Image (cartoon, helix red, strand yellow):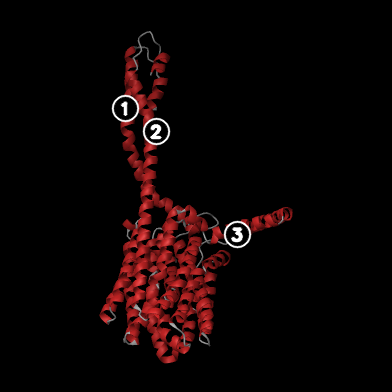
Amino acid sequence: MTEDVEVHQAQPNSTDSAKALVTRSRTSSLQAVETDPGSEEPDQHEEESSSFLEVQHHSNKGAEDSSGGPVAPDGGWGWVVVAATILVLAMTLAFPSCIGIFYTDLQNDFQASNTETSWVPAIMMAVLHAGGPVCSVLVESLGCRATIIIGGILSGLGMAASSFAQTIVELYITAGIITGMGFSLSFQPSITMVGHYFVRRRAFANALSSIGTALGLSTLPLLANSLLSSFGWRGSFLVLGGVLLNCCVCGAVMRPLRAKPKMEARTGEMKNCQLKTNYLSISQEREGLKGRLRATLSTVMPFLRRHMAFDLLCSHPYFCAYALGVSWMMLGFVVPLVYLVPYATAYGMEQDRAALLMAILGLVNIIVRPATALVFGLPRFRGSHNFAYLFATAVLINGLSNCICGMATSFPVLLAYVIVFGFSMSLIGSLLFTVLMDTVEMSRFPSALGLISIMESIMLLLGPPLAGMLVDSTGQYNYVFFACSITSCTAGLFIMLSFYWLDRQKNREVKSSFTHKDSNSLNPSIKMTIDCDYTPVPLHGNNIRDMETDV
């Protein structure tokens, strides 16, 4: 372009100067053609190096304060939030596994079958995950800190009330619904707070916070077994209810990042809502029943989009594949945690050694999860898009490990099973929320987590009772572990193949668009070069304006 300006500005009077100008124009155009492909590589490198900053910008979009500035410190008080999240996960996600310690006592006390007794942990885990929309609404209106404190109070009161249950149905309500809802209101806002406090070190923070589940798996079974031998299952439930009240303390340190919305904004929103309500009421009166149904749908659909992210199932193929795979995995993922102790004791193993297996499982998680946190926190893993494949591989290994447990019931075999199962479980727990945060924007993470939680709750509600029916019909526990192996392996393969196919489709689209853009950018330069090569040099009689027209 500078040479063309020089052509227009210069006014030579001789043919030699005109030839020189034409030669310079031809040389510059050839250099433009030769340097265009090479110049795109640095641009691509700059785009790749800035892709993580763009992801960070989108991730911070949902965690900005009212002034619009970034608020994710990637450290500082965030480490206190991680420590509190570790304790919350230890008291919530890992708690249903210790119900297996009381499984035989509950079955004998209430004269219940395996199917009826298995509904207690099933309802607890289902409500824990199904409370996502309720949790999302409370977080939006009250904040994460208040929601966690409410969840701690509910879980503590529900577990204490379950110690006075006289029927198995009362246990479903107290230990299942009330305690499970308290767990849901505690653990989901904790995970959300970690995502807001960390962006660059998010994989490391999520893997580190997942140690809480391992901590609970290693300590709660031993604590439950000790309480059972001293106070019975009723006294144990009462003491555990007091332990769960510590979630309130953990919630108190969850300092919010975003400032409270200004009163002017709230007043404007209230006025807009009031005007919209008046408009809807007028339209309802005019259109009758059809208008009411339309107004109801117009109110329900934004609510579902905000708190349950149903729109992502249709518009986001990666999220759809991940949600379906994780939900199918949950059908058999937690069943071994419930039936491992009854399976070991049914074949003659002592209660203390069976509880020791659960403690070893938690110990393996405690060792592996910090190691994965350190590995995933390395600079080479930051902004990586391969976490989904690692997660799918871990799910596949987890499913194959269940076959070990179904082969024999000796302590060495079950110990090997616990080690392999604990290793794969650690990887799954470390990457479960990281993959979801990398798949969707952080502003949609709470609603996406709520939808996945509801889908998981359906499978978690069906898993233990179906396993109990299988035990009641066959009289053997090993078929349960084989069934869990099938569900986990198919879920891992589904996630892996789905992400691989979607990645290939995306790469093809990117390559085709790049090729089209490249051809469009090169054609004018090539045409200019050809024109310069075959344009005759003007004679002495031509003036400068004619020469410029020929060029």
| Amino acid type of the residue that numbered disc 3 sits on in the rendered structure | Val
Kindly identify which residue carries mark 2: 520
Q: CA distance from mark 1 to mark 2?
A: 17 Å
Residue type at mark 2?
Asn
- The reply to whether discs 2 and 3 touch (Cβ–Cβ < 8 Å) is no
Q: Which of the 4 image quarters holds residue 508?
A: top left
Q: Secondary structure at mark 2?
A: helix
Would residue 504 appear left or right of 294 to someone viewing this image? left
Q: Is residue 49 above or below residue 189?
A: above
Q: Quadrant of residue 217?
A: bottom left
How dense is the environment of label 2, judged by Cα within 10 Å: few (below 14), some, or many (20 and up)? few
Label 3: state its secondary structure.
helix
Crowd tier of the residue under label 3, counting other residues whose Cα lies within 10 Å: few below 14, some 14–19, many 20 or above: few
**Residue 169: image tag:** none
Q: CA distance from mark 2 to mark 3?
A: 46 Å
Looking at the rendered structure, the secondary structure element under dot 1 is: helix
Q: Earlier in the sequence, mark 2 or mark 3?
A: 3
Q: Is residue 75 visible?
A: no
Counting residues from the start of the chain, the first of labels 1 and 2 encountered is 1
Spot occupied by residue 546 in the image (x, y as percentages of width and height): 41, 14
Q: Please state which amino acid type lies under the numbered disc 1.
A: Leu
Q: Residue at x 47, y 81 (%)?
A: 116
The mark lying in front, picked from 2 and 3, is 3
The numbered mark, 3 or 1, whose residue comes first in the sequence reads 1
- On the image, numbered disc 1 is attached to which residue? 30
- Mark 1 closeness class: few <14, some 14–19, many ≥20 residues within 10 Å: some
Q: State the quadrant of the C terminus.
A: top left
Residue farthest toward the left in the current orientation of the protein: 412
Q: Quadrant of the N terminus?
A: top left
Q: Residue at x 45, y 83 (%)?
A: 113
